[in-house]
Image (cartoon, rainbow, N blue to C red):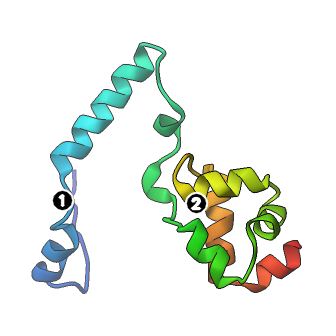
Amino acid sequence: MAELKFNTKLTPEEIDKNFEKIDFFSGIMDGLGETLKYEKGKAGAETFARKRSLPTVDVAEIRKSLSMTQKMFASVLGVSCRTVEAWECGKSNPTPTAKKLIYLISENHALAKKLM
């Protein structure tokens, strides 16, 4: 088998810096824990949806940046006003799909107007 070669323009120092805050052991242990839960039939939704692929969103901050009320923002997202309120006060979290939509709206405010 041929030796694998990794080509990059990054210096070894830059590569080290990119990985300095990643705890690989913890990630492996989390994965093993998820595998065990899956095998026992007790896997949660987070086992199937990778958390790292989801953007971080501050619902209240994004809504305010759009100069929208909770009711208006809820209408744009297709959820109830109480749902937006729960997200903003930390009682619940947006679904992965809602998080992605909120993120897209935060990156391009024109999308919110199109969805109204």
Residue 16: mark:
none
Q: In front: 101, or 88?
A: 88
Q: In front: 65, or 18?
A: 65
Farthest-out residue, top: 40
Which callout, 2 or 1, points at the residue further toward the start of the chain? 1
Q: Which part of the image, by quadrant, shows the C terminus?
A: bottom right
Amino acid type of the residue tagged 1 in the rendering: Glu
Task: Establish if 102 lies above or below 35.
Answer: below
Farthest-out residue, left: 13
Mark 2 residue element: helix
For label 1, the residue is: 3
Q: Circle 2: is it few (<14), some (14-19), or many (20+) Cα within 10 Å?
A: some
In whole angstroms, how far apart are the C-alphas of marks 2 and 1?
51 Å
In the picture, residue 12 is in which quadrant? bottom left
Q: In x, y percent, where is residue 18?
A: 22, 73
Q: In x, y percent, where is residue 100?
A: 63, 63
Mark 1 residue element: loop
Counting the numbered discs, the total is 2
Q: Mark 2 and mark 1 in contact? Answer it, CB < 8 Å.
A: no
Is 6 left, or right, of 42 in this rendering? Answer: left
Is 14 left, or right, of 71 in this rendering? Answer: left
Which residue is depicted at the point 19% across and 64% down? 21
Is 8 left, or right, of 72 in this rendering? Answer: left
Q: In front: 113, or 21?
A: 113
Is 105 left, or right, of 7 in this rendering? Answer: right
**Which callout, 2 or 1, points to the residue nearer the camera?**
2
Q: In x, y percent, where is residue 63?
A: 66, 74
Amino acid type of the residue tagged 2 in the rendering: Glu
In the picture, residue 22 is in which quadrant? bottom left
For label 2, the residue is: 88
